[in-house]
Amino acid sequence: MTRHIIAMGGGGFSMEPDHLALDRYVMRQTRKRRPKVCFVPTASGDSEGYTVKFYAAFSALGAQPSHLSLFRPPTGDLEDFVLDKDIIYVGGGNTRSLMALWREWRLDRIFRKAHRHGVVLAGISAGALCWFQEGLSDSVPGKMIRVECLGLVRGSHCPHYSNQAARRPAYLRMVAAGRMKAGLAADDGAALHFVDGTLSAVVTSRPQASAFRVHRRAGKAVEQALDVKYLGG
């Protein structure tokens, strides 16, 4: 069973509603004409507006959309609900709150099982961070903090890398100090595609979007630019 994780530093239907290249790319990994795509808006407090945008985008793409709310659960058997899907697509927002709620509802275990069963796992920002061992998050106002996540991808992650002024310096500083593991950073419009736990490709919806490996060497953080494939306009 091939296991896919697609972590978007930013972009997708919520940031690029007229250019759904990354969302199409996620759907293609299922090799199904009408995949079942489930949106998980936990990090945004189950924002109704965010969810409406998801349904509009993925209906237009020909998917079978649904969503998983923890404030209004669709069923008492969340595991069965999740394992029935082809794609789990996690939205952005507060990563710290997302992880706390997932653990309370045992969604962390359910998503690990879904991964083993070949359900494509994807997401943007908090929905990208959540799959790594840890990530750099702005979950606490005015601060950049380390959040422990699911650990399906080894190392750390930083989304919005070149797009939010505080992100890059904070990530470099924390990796250099050994406060975060070496990892991967992605700009808005860049997606890291892992196949069976290994980075297989970096695709972008924006010509200038980039992604980097970041590791510690002699007490400093070192960036290594990754090759990217632009998906076109």
Image (cartoon, rainbow, N blue to C red):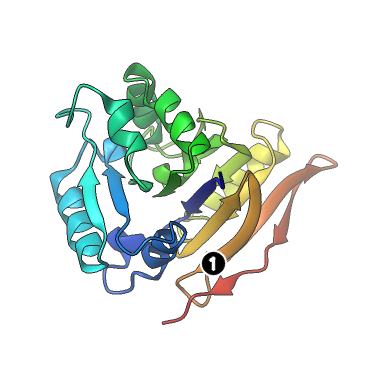
Q: Nearer the viewer, residue 70 or 160?
A: 70
Tell whether 180 sits left or right of 3: right
Where is the N terminus found, in terms of image quarters?
top right
For disc 1, the marked residue is 203
Q: Quadrant of residue 83?
A: top left
Secondary structure, mark 1, is: strand
Q: Quadrant of residue 58?
A: bottom left
Amino acid tagged 1: Val
Q: Nearer the viewer, residue 168 or 142?
A: 168
Residue 168 point in image, percent of width and height: 57, 52
Residue 127 point in image, percent of width and height: 40, 44
The answer to whether one can see residue 15 in this image is yes
Q: Nearer the viewer, residue 154 or 159?
A: 154
Q: Residue at x 58, y 63 (%)?
A: 202
Q: Residue at x 21, y 68 (%)?
A: 60
Tell whether 226 sits left or right of 60: right
Q: Quadrant of residue 132?
A: top right
Q: Nearer the viewer, residue 79 or 184?
A: 79
Q: Residue at x 40, y 35 (%)?
A: 95
Residue furthest toward the bottom? 233
Q: Tally the marks.
A: 1
Where is the C terminus found, in terms of image quarters?
bottom left
Q: Residue at x 85, y 41 (%)?
A: 218
Decide: is 58 above or below 168: below
Tell whether 196 sits left or right of 165: right
Is the residue marked by circle 1 packed among few (<14), some (14-19), or many (20+) residues within 10 Å? many
Residue 13 point in image, percent of width and height: 30, 62
